[in-house]
Structure formats: structure tokens, C-alpha cells
Image (cartoon, rainbow, N blue to C red):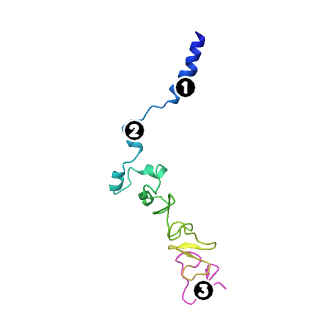
Amino acid sequence: MFLVLFFLMTIVMPTFIVTPNPLTDKEKEKLVPNTDTLASSESLRGFDYLLRGTATCDKFPRVCRAKGTAGPDCCKKKCVNVMKDNLNCGECGKRCRFGQTCCNGNCIDVMYDERNCGACKNKCKKGSFCNYGMCSYA
């Protein structure tokens, strides 16, 4: 009797533990967003879970325009701002060289550029020059 009980416990019980219950259709709909509704909706309310890693911007590019994301553009499944990102300056994959900064989608050497001296859109006064990121440095 003990052997039969032991046999049942070791063979039958793990199948109950390992075998998950299948999801109903309603549960599946909750997990996967309806793409027709997503494409036609004007806002991202109700789709905040997309920002948490459920979906990437290559499938749902509108997630990059939501508040709190890194930028409005999608490059290699990541939201970026191609106007400021040194690894995606002006377009996806365009890297700025060492010492350059991405200013308005262009790689600029802010150490010597009069229109972007030390930082983007920091213009030196007329007649002065930019040296080491400072205007009219002696």
C-alpha cells in the first residue's frame, strides 16, 4: 500500500504542479493590445504598460512620444532624441566623434564652435572667438 501511495505521489503530483491552466480568450485580450484600437486612438491612456517593457517602439512607435520617454524617435528598439543623442545624431546609428556633441542633429565640436561654444546654442558675441568651450578665452 505504501508503494502504491508513493508511486502516485512521485508520478502523478508533479504533472498537476507543472501543467499550467490555459488562459481564457478574455485573459489573452488583456495581455495583448488590440492593434486596431492602438492605431486609431489619439492618446496613450490605458497603454502605459507598453512603456514598462511589454512592447518595444519598433512595434508601437507611439510609445516614444509619451511623457517621460528619452525621446520621440525609435532607434534599435529604444526611444531616443536624434537631435541630442550622441549615439544617434540626426539619424539612427550616426555617432558623434570623440569631443563632439550632438547639437540640433549635427555633430559639433563645442570646444571651438562660435555658435555652440561650450554647449549647444551658446553663441559668442560678435568679434569674439570660442576656445576650450569658452568665448574669448585668453
Judged by depth in the image, the label closer to the viewer, 2 or 3, is 2
SS category of the residue bearing label 2: helix
Q: Earlier in the sequence, mark 3 or mark 1?
A: 1
In the rendered image, the vertical position of residue 78 relative to residue 11, given as above or below: below
Q: Is residue 121 magenta?
A: yes
Rendered location of residue 77, percent (x, y): 50, 57
- The residue that label 3 is drawn on is 129
Circle 1 packing at 10 Å, graded few (<14), some (14-19), many (20+), is: few
* Residue 49 vertical position relative to residue 98 in the rendered view, above or below: above
- Pointer 3 and pointer 1: residues touching (CB < 8 Å)? no
Residue span colored magenta? 117-138
Q: CA distance from mark 2 to mark 3?
A: 65 Å
Marks 3/1: CA–CA distance:
77 Å
Position in image of residue 38 (x %, y %) = 36, 53
Which residue in the protein does label 2 denote?
A: 27
What residue did someone put label 1 on?
Answer: 14
Amino acid, disc 2: Glu
Question: Mark 1 or mark 2: which comes first in sequence?
Answer: 1
Give the camera-side residue of 116 and 29. Answer: 29
For this orientation, the residue located farthest to the top is 1
